[in-house]
Amino acid sequence: MNNEAGHDLLDAVVAATDWSGYRCGCGRDASHLPELLTRLLAPRGESDTDVHHEITSHVVTSEYLNESALPATRALLAGLADGVGWDVYAKVTQVLLYILSCETVANAFPPVDPGYVDLCHAEARKAEWLLLRDFRSGPPVVVDDIIEIFELLDEEEWRERLVALRDRRDDAVRRPS
């Protein structure tokens, strides 16, 4: 999972985003989020996995999606594509689950377009191929999160297939040789 070459895609997404143009759950603009995201998605051994709680509180407030969720989702997906360890992967899927569980945007002035939730969910949907790539080799906590993400994306057919694959894998592990 780890990409020894670095985080080229993450760096590109962070650099291409005008973070100050997005409002954050803390009430400020989102220009401080790249630092938190890069701390979480740092190369193996350097990652601060505890920061995922802080990231979540900036993008989701009391089950409401904040404007900073869209660029954060893009950065998280870029980090997954670049490659991270399973401990970090599990934290990223947790943040994605929080984002996907939101159905409304936080009250803000000026108001955020109500279609913003759909936009964030569509952005998260782009992770499907990454999640499918990593499903078979992921540890149980990641596998369960991936299944839940597919459920939140209303991908029932994929979710059912993944549950069946997980169950077969679990049976093979439990079955004595």
Image (cartoon, rainbow, N blue to C red):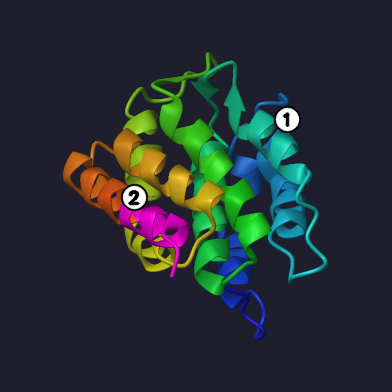
Q: Is residue 30 left or right of residue 45?
A: left
Image quarter (top left, top right, bottom left or bottom right) of the N terminus: bottom right
Report, in whole angstroms, how far the alpha carbon at label 2 lies from the one at label 1. Answer: 44 Å
User: Dot 1: few (<14), some (14–19), or many (≥20) neighbours within 10 Å?
Assistant: few
Identify the residue shown where x is 63% and y is 47%: 91
**Residue to which mark 2 is pinned:** 167
- Residue reaching furthest to the left: 157
Q: Give the residues in magenta.
A: 166-177
Q: What is the three-letter code of the residue carrying label 2?
A: Asp
Whether residue 94 is in magenta: the answer is no
Q: What is the three-letter code of the residue carrying label 1?
A: Arg
Q: Is residue 57 left or right of residue 148?
A: right
Residue 79's x, y, as percent? Answer: 58, 63
Identify the residue shown where x is 61% and y is 79%: 3
Residue 41's x, y, as percent? Answer: 68, 61
Between 88 and 34, the residue placed more toward the observer is: 88
Q: Is residue 107 left or right of residue 54?
A: left
Q: Is residue 123 above or below residue 106?
A: below
**Residue to which mark 1 is pinned:** 28
Residue 40's x, y, as percent? Answer: 72, 55
